[in-house]
Every structure is written in structure tokens, then in C-alpha cells.
Image (cartoon, rainbow, N blue to C red):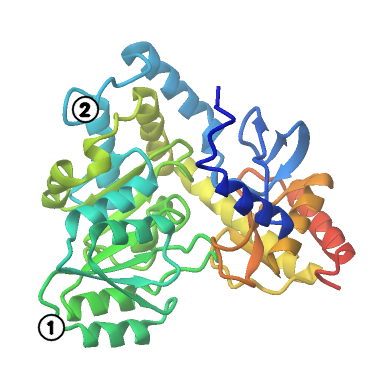
Amino acid sequence: MANPARTQLAYLEATLDELKQQHRYFHLRVLSGEQKPVATFDGRKVINLSSNNYLGLASHPKLRAAALAAIRKYGVGAGAVRTISGTMKIHMDLERQIAKFKHTEACVVFQSGFAANAGTVSAILGKDDLIISDELNHASIIDGCRLSKAAIRVFKHKDTADCAKICEETKDWPGHKLLITDGVFSMDGDIAPLPALCDLADKYNCIMMVDDAHSSGVLGRNGRGTIDHLGCHGRVDIQVGTLSKAIGAMGGYVCGSQQLIEFLYHRARPFLFSTSHPPSVAATCQAAFTLLASRAGAELIARLWENTRYFQKGLVEQGFLPSGSETPISPIPVGEAGKAFEFSRELFKAGLFAPAVGYPTVAEGKARLRAIVTATHTRKDLEKALDTLGRVARRLAIIH
């Protein structure tokens, strides 16, 4: 029980009060049951436009069966970190499967995509090195850059001319150089200009690294990601992906050369100091990649894109501005954060869960709803969602 006399953290209350006054304070929505396109949050059945479960694999029968079989065979936990006794054959099998899928020599799985990014960047670079990073890269990349203690230069979002200018200014940098970008940017849904960035990495002798979290299972042949989608195999030194979005489970991974992966075994702190995945999770991911590589996986991805095109076209027809998204991430611009959070709350009351995003996740004045459709939404779900979005937005004078 907390001691009421202790006041060392009382200053946090002022920040929380400020968030409430700005209408940016939120409560966590609690899901009852499965992560599905229509789900129950906080006791209310709503259309779910808030999930990264792009292909519906989080509740797929083949993944369920794989998880249950692994529990029966291996138990519920790995029992240790990978470098002690926590590396099971099922972990190595999964990593070989991912490496083959991504057309790389080797792979290592981390406990999360965040850990994969932050742990890799901070492991391979040090204080004498340089990082050249897109301004809208994910927070895990930003934290990894800071942890590395390397110098950081940020180029304007997707601006290859600005990136080239920085590369030219730092061409004589004495240490190692890393050029890093998201493959798909998580707040806007746009795709990195990867071929041009690879050209710059080649010209200026940079390590090329891509975080493909939101393109794994979405872009490329059978969901192989932006590297495949944009024809950049062999040009990207480090590929990061996630197991917690389209794959439907949890974790992250890094793909690259055998030398890179062995180095991360020895220097990536999240790998060294975190217990490995439960065998049921590893088996689930194996089943997901097997499914992705099949005709059934290709059909799910095709359905995801069919739903995406229908929904994004419907948003424009309702009166929302085109978002510029190139993926199933569909940002709905609002502007002021308080209005965006109000919009989200009113939509929830009307039977639609579409979360608001404001500063510091996005810049001041660029708050939006971040909607994601999945392969498992029905046309009826999407029609109802579009009608609800338009009706509530007009009532709140967000559109006219």
C-alpha cells in the first residue's frame, strides 16, 4: 500500500491535470474477447478501426492450433535468456524460416519491434559514429539513436535532396555512418523512397537500415515488405520487422548477414537481458509465416487491399481530405488535439473505435484519427464505419 505521506512523485499530477484541461487525457480501452473487426471494448460492441491485426491472424485457427500444440510439447515458458538456457530449437527454426522468407542470410528474434530497433542501433554504433535519420522515424529508432551516443542528423521527411545534402556535408565523417528509415511510416501510412535512399547509402558508404514493421505482411510478394515491394533486395544491410502486427502474435526481428546476427547475439542488450519468447509464441509465428507464403496468405493480403481502397475512397466521398496514405493506415486529419480526442470519444459512443493521436506522437496542430482496416472487415462493417465517421464529423463541424 502506498504511503500517503510520500510526495516525491506529486509533481506528476500537475502534468495529468494539464492533459485533462487540454482534453488530451485518455483512459485505456479494455478489450473483452478476441481482437476482431467488430469487438467489445469497455463493455460496448464497436467496429474496430484501431487494430494492427492487418490480416486477422491473431485469432486464426491455424495459429491457435500451433500455439496449443507447442504448449503441450514444450510447456508455457522458455525459462531463461537466449544466452543461457533459453534458446530452444523452435526459436532457431523460426529465425531460419523468417530469414528464408525475407531473402537474407540470417535472423534474430527480439521480444518486441521496439527492442529490435533500439537494441540494434545502440549495439552497432557508438559515440564516434553518425546516424542520418528521417524526421518521422518511429520512436524506437529515435531512442536507439540516442542510446548509441552517435551524432544524429535528421533529414526532412522523405526528402531525398535534403538527405543527399547531409550525406555530402558528412562525406568525410571518420566513423561509421548509418542511414535509417521506416519502410512505412506508422502515422501517415506513406512509403519511404527506398531506392533513392539506397543509392545514397551506396554513394556515401552508409549502412542501410529499414524498419519494415507496418509493411511486413502488407507489401511485397506474400507480404515480404518494402524491400521486396520496391525491388531493393541486396541493398539493405539491416531489415527490422515485427511479429505483433500482420503476423498476429508478439515480438520483433532483425534480418541481415550472418555476421550481423552473431554480433547482435553478443552486443544487443534486449537480446542479452530478456527471457526468450514462450514456445507457443514461436510456434504461432511459424504458422503465420507458413500461411503468408501460401495462396491463402496471398488472398488475405488481396482482401486487405480491396478493403483499404474501398475505405479510403469512401473517406473522400464523405468530405474528408485525401490523406496521402499508400497503405491500410488511414489518417483522418483533424488539426487541434482536443477536437481530435472529442471526435474519437463521440465516435465510440456511436459504435466506432478509431483512436485519436496528438502531440507528442505527431506534431502540434496535426492531430488526427488513425484508422486501420483489416482483411477481415466486411463491406457492411466499412459502410457503417464510413457513415458514422461522416455523421459525427459533420455534427462536430470537422467537415461540412
Image quadrant holding the N terminus, namely top right
Q: Nearer the viewer, residue 244 or 120?
A: 120
Q: 42 or 281: nearer the eye?
A: 42
Q: Which residue matches tag 2? A: 87
Between 187 and 282, the one lying in front of the other is 187
- Residue 39 in percent (x, y) is at 70, 36
Q: Position of residue 76 (x, y in %)?
A: 38, 17
Q: Determine which quarter of the picture holds residue 95.
A: top left
Horizontal placement of 127 versus 301: left or right?
Answer: left
Q: Is residue 257 above or below residue 83?
A: below
Give above or below for 69 relative to 101: above
Query: In which quadrant of the rendered image does the C terminus lie?
Result: bottom right
The numbered mark, 1 or 2, whose residue comes first in the sequence reads: 2
Extreme residue in the right direction = 395
CA separation in Å, label 1 and label 2: 42 Å
In terms of secondary structure, where does tag 2 sit? loop
The residue under the point 60% across, 71% down is 364
- What is the number of the mark on residue 172? 1
Which tag is nearer the camera, tag 1 or tag 2?
Answer: 1
Mark 1 belongs to which amino acid?
Answer: Asp
Q: Is residue 355 left or right of residue 92?
A: right
State the residue lying farthest toward the top: 72
Cβ atoms at labels 1 and 2 below 8 Å apart: no
Which quadrant of the figure has residue 129?
A: bottom left
Q: Position of residue 285 (x, y in %)?
A: 39, 34
Q: Position of residue 221 (x, y in %)?
A: 40, 55
What residue type is disc 2 on? Thr
Relative side of 234 to 213, left or right: left
- Name the residue located 56 percent from the left edge and 49 percent from the top edge: 11
